[in-house]
Image (cartoon, rainbow, N blue to C red):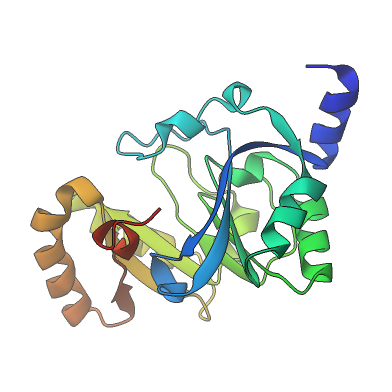
């Protein structure tokens, strides 16, 4: 990578863009809302059930000027969701500040495994056992989304819930390949522990990105 490009990446003025698309938010608190998704390459958290493993290697996704991404987003939506990969691997202050200056709400979906950056209207934290969130990130969470792949994940979810603020919404979401087995378990758990809500990947049921 050329030095001048690397400098722009380091400042967050360029980002390794994997894809961008306008769709319906399928998960969590904002399910059903139209949003422009910006998927940034790069992730070393290593979830074995990840459905976008092609995002892991940032080198496969050429750096794109944040200004171009912002101009694309402005054509479609008043809400942007920045996801990955693991978006907090990159400095996100530049892109989020400029999106908000254009009256676009900024949402993030992150494991929290990297230092906090960016200016957010909604912060969705989805911790993973393979690389836990940094302590500084928990207090930023508006939404805690825990993926339930097996019964042991309920214990992990409760451990993570103790670390976020009381204002944070709590969601349990079945891992897609285990949904038939885990949905009944999640339903039973939420009925016994009503501080939690259920999140489903509704975009997959709707067959949209």
In the visual, does 16 lie left or right of 142? right
Q: Position of residue 136 (x, y in %)?
A: 65, 56
**Which residue is at the far right?**
4
Residue closer to the observer: 43 or 162: 43
Residue 55 seen in this snapshot:
yes
**Which residue is at the far front?**
75
126 over 14 or under it: above or below = below
Residue closer to the observer: 97 or 185: 97
Quarter of the image for residue 188 reads bottom left
Residue at x 51% of width, y 30% of height: 44
49 over 60 or under it: above or below = below
In the visual, does 94 lie left or right of 36? right
Quarter of the image for residue 187 reads bottom left
In the visual, does 63 lie left or right of 159? right
Q: Position of residue 22 (x, y in %)?
A: 53, 59
Residue at x 75% of width, y 63% of height: 119
30 over 209 or under it: above or below = below
What is the total number of numbered labels drawn onto the structure image?
A: 0
Residue closer to the observer: 108 or 5: 5
Residue 117 seen in this snapshot:
no
Location of the N terminus by quadrant is top right
In the visual, does 81 lie left or right of 172? right
Residue at x 38% of width, y 43% of height: 129
Residue at x 68% of width, y 59% of height: 73
Quarter of the image for residue 194 reads bottom left
Q: Position of residue 102 (x, y in %)?
A: 81, 69
Q: Position of residue 191 (x, y in %)?
A: 17, 81
164 over 89 or under it: above or below = below
């Amino acid at each position: 990578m050329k030095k001048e490009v690397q400098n722009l990446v380091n400042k967050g003025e360029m980002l390794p863009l994997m894809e961008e698309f306008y769709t319906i938010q399928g998960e969590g608190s904002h399910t059903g809302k139209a949003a422009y998704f910006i998927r940034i390459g790069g992730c070393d958290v290593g979830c074995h059930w990840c459905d976008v493993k092609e995002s892991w290697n940032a080198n496969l996704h050429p750096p794109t000027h944040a200004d171009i991404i912002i101009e694309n987003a402005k054509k479609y939506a008043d809400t942007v969701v920045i996801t990955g990969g693991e978006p907090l691997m990159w400095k996100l202050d530049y892109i989020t500040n400029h999106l908000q200056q254009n009256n676009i709400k900024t949402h993030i979906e992150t494991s929290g495994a990297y230092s906090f950056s960016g200016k957010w209207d909604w912060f969705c934290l989805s911790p993973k056992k393979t690389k836990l969130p940094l302590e500084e990130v928990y207090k930023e969470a508006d939404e805690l989304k825990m993926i339930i792949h097996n019964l042991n994940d309920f214990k992990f979810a409760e451990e993570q819930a103790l670390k976020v603020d009381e204002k944070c919404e709590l969601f349990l979401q079945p891992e897609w390949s285990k949904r038939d087995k885990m949905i009944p378990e999640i339903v039973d758990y939420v009925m016994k522990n009503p501080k939690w809500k259920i999140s489903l990947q509704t975009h997959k049921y709707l067959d949209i990105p």
